[in-house]
Amino acid sequence: MAAGDENTPRDLSDVRFVTITGPKLDRAAPPDVPEAGGMVLTSAIVPELVDCEAAALPCVVNEAGAFAASGVHVAKQLADLSGATDDLVRLAVALTTTLTSANHSQGSAATIGALRPAETLPPGVEDPWTGPHTVSTLRLPAALRRIPTHAIRLKRRLLRRKSPKINLVAFFLLFVCVLVAFARVTSDRLTPFNWFLSVVWSVYAPLIVIGLIGAVFLRTQQRRGRKASANDASEVPMTSGTGIVVRMRRNKPLRSEYKGRSNHLLVVTVPTLLANGNLPALERVLLSLLLNLPEYFDRFHVDVITEGNVDLRPLQEWIKSCGRMAEPIRIVNVPFEYSTPLGARFKTRANQFAMEARREAGENTEDCYVYHLDDDTHIGRDTAASLAEFIELDGDRFYLAQGILTFPHELTTSKFCRLADSIRPADDLTRFAFFTGMLGTPLGGLHGEHLVIRADIEDEIGWDFPDTVIEDAYFAIQFATKYPKRSTTLNSYSYGASPASVRDLLRQRRRWIEGLLRLAFNRRLPLVPKLPLLYSIFTWSLAPFQFVGLALLISYASGMDNTSPVSPVFLPLWAISLAGVFWFYIEGLKVNLSASDRPRPHLLLAVVIIPAIYVITLIETLGVMMGIVRFMGFGSQKVSEVITKPI
């Protein structure tokens, strides 16, 4: 805007106003906490609300389907609107133009040159790759540069693999092959060892069947209404006013393509310890939220939850460098002296404090939803779309939804951990889809991330769970008890990082199994809702005895050259179990590859991962044994464990 036009009234008919609401802070902040960027919520919270008008420039979409301009600014008076947007427009245009002009096919190797804007920047806009690093010239985290299509869709059909279909035929082919192989080794030996193997290698079969039913449920959601939705480009998006039958029968692809908006307040919580080396991952997460949420939400803010006397300066400096784009970010600091009535610790304690802070701010209402993320898991356009879709189209029937965790391969340096985490999205496509989606009751547990809950329901249940490191599973049981048939699935991905080393992978699995065992023996929780989760814990705890290497070792040491079942009746159960494990890893690998920077054909890796499963199982078994040892009292977790996620 020219200098001479500063006082000229501006046509505001194309400006959409939203309200960002947040608690007012006590400005007498501790002297060791610098006041630079973001908002710091401490125990001294004034329960007054500050309502400010935020004007968001409408997204201008070019022929390639990319954003040409996007921004959010905050102003108390409309008279200040024109002057306050100039620097934000320069930042947003440079940022989005840089992202969408990336030559995705060349991958991360073509760094600066590939990401340089292909079109001439508007007058007065500095090149973000050559200009100085100022407030109006944001330097993107390296990881987000490598995965631009997660934030902005640009020629999706060319740059990004379509969402993979759940291939049930592959399971049945694997089942037949495994069954034929097992049938050739059947004998009539009835030793105790054969009885042991017959039972232990069959106990996993019911879990595989549950997973198959969940996968069929998701496939049904993807297929229904598909023909009707194929030609609905000009159709008005569904809203909460659309008939409930129509909403229930709508097509739900694996990654949401919802085009509507939500006026509900969305609060995103991102707990972090701000450990050394993890700040780049946190920046990637926050920037993905700031890029994607404004397209679907009129009101949102992001709460970064920290604990104690952690050094906030690096984070606050980064927030300040983002300028007004980062206005929705608030820093919620949990005081060192804070404690809960039941003595919650670690992340559970932090979640409880943040929930109480929102309660004092008046945000824990049925009009607000809380979306939980980890500090290494960013979102994509499909994630933001699915959140709006759930709130607008399913919010009157469900109070909680959980999506699919994916682990792009470029976010970890460990090739082994990439393959090992193939099982995690497969779990979402199968077991979690059955309990959380089909039954509408999260009896199989929940993730602590990519999870959205209505704020008043979360406030009612709370996070004050004593002596646990798996607060998500505790919350799942409490929710299932109070609100059966009130949960569903989010049809979207979240994009997280696998552990950076096998050592970190072992620590992660050790913490999970220890927490699950403590939950299993916790008498505070009712038994019946725990039964499905107890079965899952039981099968996982048997991993050391199910390991084929151990069976062969015992067979060799004892001189028994036969490991066949005691009866042919067990053969189908063995085949279901083994084929199911193979299929889970293959399907999960397909999902992770589809979420990665440069998706590769999964057929070759699917063949490679089958023998690799035996090595992965060995490491997973070791992690289970470490968790069992810690559960039995040999060592305990004293502080929050940090799994390094440097990307």
Image (cartoon, grey):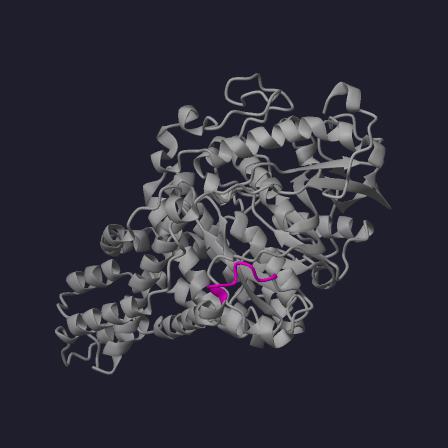
In this view of the protein, which residue sits in the foreground, 168 or 296?
296
Q: Position of residue 455 (x, y in %)?
A: 71, 58
Q: Position of residue 128 (x, y in %)?
A: 54, 23
Q: In the image, is residue 478 above or below residue 89?
A: below
Residue appearing at x 35%, y 53% in the figure: 589
The answer to whether residue 449 is seen in the rendering is: no
Residue appearing at x 30%, y 53% in the figure: 618
Left or right, 55 with reference to 186: right
The answer to whether residue 575 is seen in the rendering is: yes
Prevailing secondary structure class for the magenta stretch in the rendered image = loop
As for residue 231 lying within the magenta part, the answer is yes
Q: Position of residue 606 (x, y in %)?
A: 26, 55
Left or right, 430 with reference to 200: right
Left or right, 366 with reference to 523: right
Over which residues does the magenta segment extend? Answer: 229-236
As for residue 473 lying within the magenta part, the answer is no
Residue appearing at x 37%, y 28% in the figure: 110
In which quadrant of the rendered view does residue 174 lie?
Answer: bottom left
In which quadrant of the rendered view does residue 204 lie?
Answer: bottom left
Q: Position of residue 58 (x, y in %)?
A: 66, 43
